[in-house]
Image: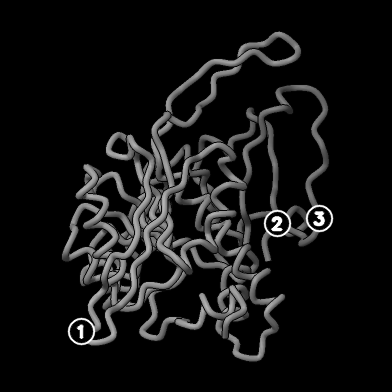
């Protein structure tokens, strides 16, 4: 338990070393009580000391102790997973943690949404075979929206200046033009509405790929894109990455239409390690954004979402 004591700028606690608890007046260290406000003087600027009942030392403010500031920075890095500790996570992109071993095996092109209880619950409902179709679709749409929002965050922005209703100038950002979406039919179409909810006027192309019954190889049956797709950055939508073969064929079709792999961002909900690794090995410049990498993917997603299960 800690108690915060405050003293004015003129008191010696700001410039002298802090003594141990045993040398301080017990009346001033009574827990759950604060020292009275000082009258006059420079009361606005107060130095804070953190006194712990079980400690024998007081902490000096980090801004006054360079060593403490350095130690605090190192401690913060280690606790947040950005230091060199063996249990730390690897961060790629904008605060998107990926397991260190997984990142080493697959590469920094794989990005995961930061895990929290909300995302975990949505994943659980989608995987639950007893979930109703209504609950499944509701959870899937929510998870899709989170992935789409983060996918849009990977696109380039440019600075702009706007005028507020009160006449003030505000420096903000806006999307650079030249983005489009491409859904891999049929399950990829489930993500189209989430993209349109965020970008009302965005153009969306489609690719139909099915596996040949005899060879089990993915085959392209239909492809329709904006005429100038070779000039655009592409959000490729496919919710479940199992083997990665379907996405690989889709990317090949995009390349045939002049799209470079480094402008393709694959939006997915679930991926297997094999699927993600296969795609990145084939196209090292592509970016994959997903919520989970797990050996078992919910391959029933398309059937249950569209009611054909």
In depth, the one of 168 and 81 nearer the eye is 168
| 74 in relation to 173, above or below | below
Q: Earlier in the sequence, mark 3 or mark 2?
A: 2
Location of residue 170 in the rendering, given as x and y in whole percent from the top left corner: 60, 17
Say what secondary structure mark 1 lies in.
loop
Mark 3 → mark 2, Cα distance in angstroms:
8 Å
Residue 173 visible somewhere in the drawing: yes
Specify which label sits upstream in the sequence, 1 or 2: 2
Q: Mark 3 points at which residue?
A: 33
Camera sees residue 54 = no
Report helix, strand or loop for mark 2. Answer: strand
Q: Name the residue under label 2.
A: 3
Label 2 environment density (alpha carbons within 10 Å; few <14, some 14–19, many ≥20):
some
Q: Mark 1 points at which residue?
A: 215
Q: Residue at x 45, y 50 (%)?
A: 151
**Which label is found at residue 22?**
none
Give the answer, above or below, for where 17 lies relative to 281.
above
């Amino acid at each position: 338990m800690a108690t915060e004591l405050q003293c004015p700028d003129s008191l010696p606690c700001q410039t002298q070393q802090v003594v141990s608890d045993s040398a301080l007046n017990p009346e001033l260290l009574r827990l759950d009580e604060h020292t009275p406000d000082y009258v006059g003087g420079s009361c606005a600027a107060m130095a804070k000391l953190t006194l712990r009942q079980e400690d024998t030392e007081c902490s000096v403010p980090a801004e006054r102790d360079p060593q403490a500031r350095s130690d605090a920075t190192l401690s913060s890095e280690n606790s947040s997973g950005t230091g060199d500790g063996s249990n730390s996570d690897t961060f790629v992109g904008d605060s998107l943690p990926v397991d260190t071993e997984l990142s080493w095996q697959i590469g920094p092109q794989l990005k995961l949404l930061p895990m929290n209880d909300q995302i975990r619950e949505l994943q659980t409902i989608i995987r639950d075979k007893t979930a109703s179709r209504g609950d499944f679709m509701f959870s899937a749409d929510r998870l899709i929206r989170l992935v789409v929002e983060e996918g849009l965050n990977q696109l380039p922005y440019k600075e702009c200046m706007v005028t507020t209703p009160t006449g003030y100038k505000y420096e903000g950002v806006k999307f650079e033009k030249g983005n489009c979406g491409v859904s891999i039919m049929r399950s990829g179409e489930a993500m189209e509405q989430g993209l349109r909810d965020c970008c009302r006027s965005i153009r969306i192309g489609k690719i139909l790929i099915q596996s040949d019954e005899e060879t089990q190889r993915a085959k392209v049956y239909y492809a329709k894109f904006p005429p100038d797709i070779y000039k655009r950055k592409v959000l490729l939508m496919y919710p479940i990455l199992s083997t990665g073969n379907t996405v690989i064929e889709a990317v090949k079709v995009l390349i045939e239409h002049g799209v470079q792999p480094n402008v393709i961002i694959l939006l997915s909900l679930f991926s297997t390690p094999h699927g993600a690794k296969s795609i990145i090995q084939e196209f090292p410049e592509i970016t994959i954004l997903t919520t989970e990498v797990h050996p078992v993917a919910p391959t029933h997603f398309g059937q249950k979402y569209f009611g054909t299960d």
